[in-house]
Amino acid sequence: MMTDKILQQQIQYYSARANEYDEWFYRIGRYDRGQENNQRWFDEVAIVKDALYQIGAVDDILELASGTGIWTQELLGIGKKITAIDASEEVIAINRYKLGSRSVEYHIFDLFTWQPDIEYDLVFFAFWLSHVPPNLLDSFLTKVNQSVHIGGQIFIIDSRFEPTSTANNHILEDDGNFYKTRKLNDGQEFQIVKIFYQPDELQDKLKQAGFQAEVKMTDNYFIYVLGRKVSTALL
Ligand SMILES: C[S@@+](CC[C@H](N)C(=O)[O-])C[C@H]1O[C@@H](n2cnc3c(N)ncnc32)[C@H](O)[C@@H]1O
C-alpha cells in the first residue's frame, strides 16, 4: 500500500536528516527566513514553552517521536523520568549525546506498530501528529490514551500552515494532498506525510479518544494542545 511505503520513507528521511534536523528549529541555513520572521518564530516558541511549563512537576513522561531532543531537554525540567521513543536510531543517538542524561530512557520503535504497556503522568509529542495519516489517526490516539493514566495529561505541539515555517526550497501548497516532498541540504528528496489538522477537528478526535482537551494556536506557526484523560462518563 502506498501509505506504508511513504511511512517507511518518512523514517528514512529523518534518519538521513538527523545531523541537519536542528537547523529547522533554530532557523539556520535554508530555514533562516529573515530577522523578522525568525523573531516571530522564537516569540511563538516561547509562548508554547510557557504553556508546557504550566503543567508543573510530574514523575513519568512519555515522549513520542522525540527526535534530536529539542523538546526532551524541556521535559527534563518537568519530569523525573522521561521515556523517549523514536523510529530513527540516528536521531536517538543525537538526543542521547546532546542531553547526556540518566533520566531519559530511549527506545527505538515504529509508532505505527508500537503497543503501549505502561500508563504515564504525561504523554508529549511535538511535530509528530502532522506526520500521522488520517486513516491511522484514531488508532494512534487510542494508543496515546492507553499510555496515560486517568487524570494524566497530554501535551501536543505541531505546525500551522505557514509557508515560512519550512525550508526556503520547500513549497508548501494548500492542495489537500498530504504527501509532501522534502529535501536535505544536499538536494536528496523524500516523500513524507504532512497534515495540518484543524483545531475543531483535533478537539473532536481527542474527545473521541477519551481526552478533555483545549486546542490553542499562536499567531502564525504553532498549534498546541493541553489535554487530560478523563473517565468516559465525563466526556
Ligand atoms: C518532525 S520530527 C519531530 C522530532 C521532535 N519531536 C521535535 O519536535 O524536534 C518527526 C520525528 O518522528 C520520527 N518518526 C518518523 N516516523 C516514525 C515512526 N513511524 N515511529 C516513530 N517515530 C517516527 C522521526 O525520526 C523524527 O524524529
Image (cartoon, grey):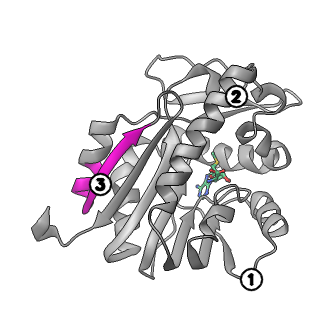
Which quadrant would residue 6 be assigned to in this image? top right
Q: What span is in magenta?
A: 205-217
Visible in this render: residue 166? no
Question: Can residue 29 be seen by looking at this rendering?
Answer: yes
Amino acid of disc 3: Ala
Cβ atoms at labels 2 and 3 below 8 Å apart = no
Q: 155 or 106, which lies in front?
A: 155
The yes-or-no answer for disc 3 within 8 Å of ligand 1 is no
Label 1: state its secondary structure: loop
Q: Earlier in the sequence, mark 2 or mark 3?
A: 2
Q: Which mark is residue 213?
A: 3
Q: Looking at the image, which residue is at 68% across and 21% down?
A: 36
Q: Residue drawn at (66%, 23%), measured in percent from left and top? A: 37
Q: How would you rate the neighbour count of disc 2 (Cα within 10 Å): few for under 14, some for 14-19, many for 20 or more? A: some
Q: Which mark is residue 38?
A: 2
Residue position for label 1: 102
Picture coordinates of residue 156, whole percent (x, y): 46, 53
Identify the residue at image location x=55%, y=30%.
179
Residue 171's spot in the image, x, y percent? Answer: 64, 17
For ligand 1, tell me if the residue under mark 2 lies within 8 Å.
no
Q: Amino acid at mark 2?
A: Asn
- Disc number placed over residue 141 in the picture, else none: none
Q: Is residue 74 left or right of residue 203?
A: right
